[in-house]
Every structure is written in structure tokens, then in C-alpha cells.
Image: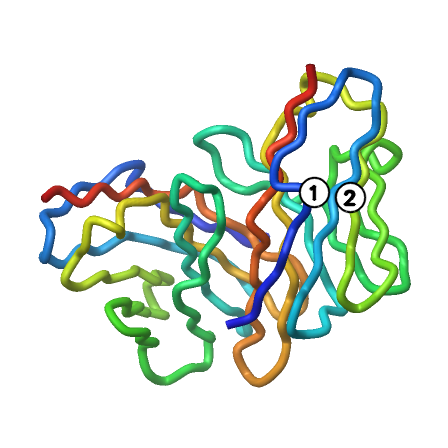
Amino acid sequence: GAVVSQHPSRVICKSGTSVKIECRSLDFQATTMFWYRQFPKQSLMLMATSNEGSKATYEQGVEKDKFLINHASLTLSTLTVTSAHPEDSSFYICSARDARGGQDTQYFGPGTRLTVL
Amino acid sequence: AQKITQTQPGMFVQEKEAVTLDCTYDTSDPSYGLFWYKQPSSGEMIFLIYQGSYDQQNATEGRYSLNFQKARKSANLVISASQLGDSAMYFCAMRVRNNNDMRFGAGTRLTVKP
């Protein structure tokens, strides 16, 4: 199956600093990537949809200036959490849409656990 | 608006037995896709199975099968011959073709007993 990588897998940072998370589709080109956030024992909540070469579309309630998304190529999207605060601590998961063939499936990265001290 | 509902917060099954995880959905769009993902404690979302709204037959992938009942708007996941490694969170998800994003249910935690 398709592989999506995410880096780093775990990051601890101080409050006020910025953290960049990378999401890569390794064996297919993804015109669309997604960023999700998951709190403990909860479901995935879509934060934004990232389209290659254009601005990301953010879900209601997600601060676009705080969560900067860049989709510079067909295989790479980045999420930057700016001026991180303890409440930003969460599990962030990216996914890439694989529209090849008829399945139109989304594959997920392994996630990044962010802890803001 | 699209909505995905998983009403079972937790399920237990004996090893080697079959288990059904429930999922109902709601959408007014006739074209949609239904997905099941497994999330073990590591956090990774593992794709299990897909069912398109126009697919005539229920999807199957190894020990996983999707019991698709379109009129009832249900897409239950059946896991046959449960294994200890099946213990995980399971999420049902839907994407409407006109939209890009995928919406998830609340999830069901499956525990397989030895």
C-alpha cells in the first residue's frame, strides 16, 4: 500500500517557540493532503485541507495564522505550529489522498506527538 | 451535512471469534465513500477497507468485510477469526465525492480476549 511519512514523530518544545511538522507521500503524488488533530481518547478532527500550489482551506475554529500550512510539492506538506502554547499539545496526523484507480483512498502518516512545556 | 456515528465506545470479543463494529452515516449526496481505519496504541492510522456508494457488492479484504446496507445507511465492519493483535481503536469514516475531506466517527475500542 501507499506510504505516508511524517517527521518528527515526537517533539517537545518550550512555550512560545514554533514547530514544523513534515508530511511526505513516498510512493505517489498527492495533490491533496490533510492535517488532523487528535486529543487523547477522541476522534480525529480535521484542521485543514492542503492543496498543492494553493492556499490551505481551514476548518472553522482553526487559526490559520497559528497553524501555517504549506504544500509546496506533490509529495510534501508542512504544518508549522507558531508560538506554541501548552494547549497546542496534541497528536497531529497528516494524510494524503491517493486518487489513483477507483478507490480514492486516504493514507495516513504515523503522527506527531507534540508536547509544549 | 455529513455525519458518521459509531455507537459502541468499546467492544470485547473472544480470540478466534467474529465481531461486528457498527457504523451509520448520513449524507444527502448520492456519491460517497466509506472507510474503516484501525488505530493501535502507536497512533498510526491503518487503512482497512473501502466501500463506494455505487459498489454493488460488499467489500472484503482478508479477515475484514464491510456489511454495507445502503437503505439503512449503515456500513458495519466485520472482523472474522479475531486475533490478539486486532485490539485497537477502529474508526469509520466517510468522504462525500463533492468534498475533499474525510469525516470520522467517534471510534470503537476493540479488545480481543485470549
Asked whether the residues under marks 1 and 2 belong to the same chain, the reply is yes
Q: Are marks 1 and 2 in contact (CB under 8 Å)?
A: yes
Q: Which residue is mark 1?
A: A47
Q: Residue at x 18, y 45 (%)?
A: B112
In depth, the one of A8 and A99 nearer the eye is A8
Disc 2 secondary structure class = strand
Read off the chain for label 1. Answer: A
Task: Using a 10 Å C-alpha cutoff, classify the residue at mark 2 as few (fewer than 14 neighbours), some (14 to 19) or many (20 or more).
Answer: many
Q: Amino acid at mark 2?
A: Leu
Q: Amino acid at mark 1?
A: Met
Disc 1 secondary structure class = strand
Q: Which residue is mark 2?
A: A79
Q: In the rendered view, would you say B75 is above or below A61?
A: below
Say whether residue A45 is left or right of residue B69: right
* Residue at mark 1 to residue at mark 2: CA–CA distance: 10 Å
Task: Using a 10 Å C-alpha cutoff, classify the residue at mark 1 as few (fewer than 14 neighbours), some (14 to 19) or many (20 or more).
Answer: many
Relative image position of residue B49 (x, y in whole percent): 40, 68
Say whether residue B95 is left or right of residue B40: right
Q: Compare marks 1 and 2 and give the one earlier in the sequence.
A: 1
Relative image position of residue A20 (x, y in whole percent): 79, 39
